[in-house]
Amino acid sequence: MQTIEQFDFSGKKAFVRVDFNVPLDEQFNITDDTRIRAALPTLKKIIKDGGSAIIGTHLGRPKEATDKLSLKHILPHISKLLGVEVQFASDCVGEEAEAKAAALHPGEVLLLENLRFHAEEEGKARNVAEDATDEEKAAAKKAVKESQKDFTKKLATLADVYVNDAFGTAHRAHASTALIAEHFDADHKLFGYLMQKEINAVEKVLKDTQRPFTAIMGGSKVSSKIEIINNLLDSVDNLILAGGMTYTFAKAFGGKVGNSIVEDDKLDLAKELVEKAKENGVNLLLGTDAKIADDFSNDANTDFAPVNEIPDGWEGLDIGPESEKRFVEVIKNSKTILWNGPTGVFEFENFEHGSRAVAEAIAAATEKGAFSLIGGGDSVACINKFGLADKVSYVSTGGGALLEFMEGKELPGIKAIRGY
C-alpha cells in the first residue's frame, strides 16, 4: 500500500476527502478550526510536491442544497491557513467542477461544494412522502443507490489519485469516503497524514499495548457504550466507568440514586458487565461517591453523597473526592490509557473538577512515558478546555469512527484503501 510520505504528487491532481465539518456561528464565522488545521499537512505535502488538490468534504446534515451549509463560508479561512488562494466550485460534480479541476495547475487548490448537497453521497433517499408505502420507500432508496454509482464515478474522474484524510467519516460507506476508492488502483489511493496518525494511535492502544492498560469511559448512557465496554473487558487491566452511567450501576445493585440519570432497562446489563469484569480479571472501578445538586444548573445547591444514597430531588453531576482519588491513582500508574467521556457535567464550572482531575492524571502518566489516546467529542472538549491537549499522546478527531474502530468493527473508509 502506498503511503503519503512516499508518494510523489508532482503533476498529479489529488481528490482529498477531508472532514471540514466545522462549527459556525450565526455570522458564518468558524468557532473551532481544529479539523481544518489537522488536514493541513496532507494538503501542503501535495502542493509542495507540485501537485494540485481537489478538496471534498461535507458540512452539517443538509437535506437539500442550502446557503447556510455552503462551503463558500469557510473558503477564506482555508485559503488563509494554506497560504494559497483556494478556488471554489459551486457544485461538487457537473460542468463547472470538471472544468475547474481540469484547469488546475501545480500548486493550486480547488474546494468543491458540500458533498452532502447530493443524496447520492450518503446513498439515502430524500423527500420521500411521509405516507409512502414500504415498497415506495424501498424503490426510492434503490434509485439513489443506482445513481450513487454515477455520482461516485464523476467525483473520481476529477483526479489522478485519491487521498482519504477524513477519519471522522471512516465508519461511513459513502461515495467520497469509500466507494470512490474502487476507481483507483492500489498505487493511486492512500491515507493522508491525519488518517494514518489516527489508525496508528488506535492500533498502538489495541495491538501494541503496554501494561497496565486503563480505559476511562464516561458519558450518560451504558447503552451507547455497551459494545466498546464489552470489547475493552477482553483487553484492559483497569476499566473506569464514570459519568451518568454510574447511577445505572448503582441502582442495579439496589442503590438509591434520587433524580440522577438512569437507564432502567439496562439494570440487568450493568450486572452482567460487572460479572464479566470479574470473570476476566479486570479491575472495574465505579464511582462510590458523587457531587450532587438539587437542580441541573451550575448555580444549584451542591453536596456530596455516596452514589447509592442520593436523596430524592437531588442528582449526581460529577464524581466525589473519594472516587476521584481512586481513579487518579490507577491512571497515574498506567502505561496505556484510553479516555472517552467525562466524569460529569464538565460544561458547568461547579461540576468539572472530576474531569479535570482525570485529565491532569492522564497528562502526568503521559509525562512518565505512558501512551494516552483521547477520543470522543466530550473528552476532546475536556482536554482542550483544561489546556492539556499538548500533554497527552494523541487527541483523536473521530467520534463515532473512533468508537467503532475500538469496538473492532471494520471501517469502510479504511478497508477501501488497504483492503482489510
Image (spheres, rainbow, N blue to C red):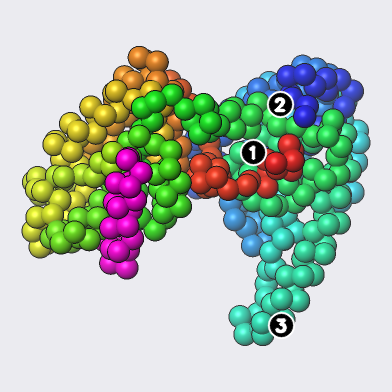
Residue drawn at point x = 86 percent, y = 56 percent: 150
Place residue 313 in its image quadrant: bottom left
Q: Nearer the viewer, residue 53 or 99?
A: 53
Q: Nearer the viewer, residue 178 or 30?
A: 178
Q: CA distance from mark 1 to mark 3?
A: 35 Å
Q: Which residues are magenta?
A: 262-282
Q: Nearer the viewer, mark 2 or mark 1?
A: 1
Q: Quadrant of the N terminus?
A: top right
Q: Quadrant of the C terminus?
A: top right
Q: What label does residue 43 carry, if any? A: 2
Residue drawn at point x = 61 percent, y = 38 percent: 167
Q: Secondary structure at mark 3?
A: helix
Amino acid on which disc 1 is placed: Ala
Residue drawn at point x = 13 percent, y = 36 percent: 322
Q: Secondary structure at mark 1?
A: loop
Place residue 259 in its image quadrant: bottom left
Residue position for label 1: 166
Label 1: how many Cα within 10 Å (few below 14, some 14–19, many 20+):
many
Q: What label does residue 135 carry, if any? A: 3
Q: What label does residue 293 carry, if any? A: none
Q: CA distance from mark 2 to mark 1?
A: 12 Å
Amino acid on which disc 2 is placed: Leu
Q: Nearer the viewer, mark 2 or mark 3?
A: 3
* Cβ–Cβ under 8 Å for marks 2 and 1: no
1 or 3: tag closer to the N-terminus: 3
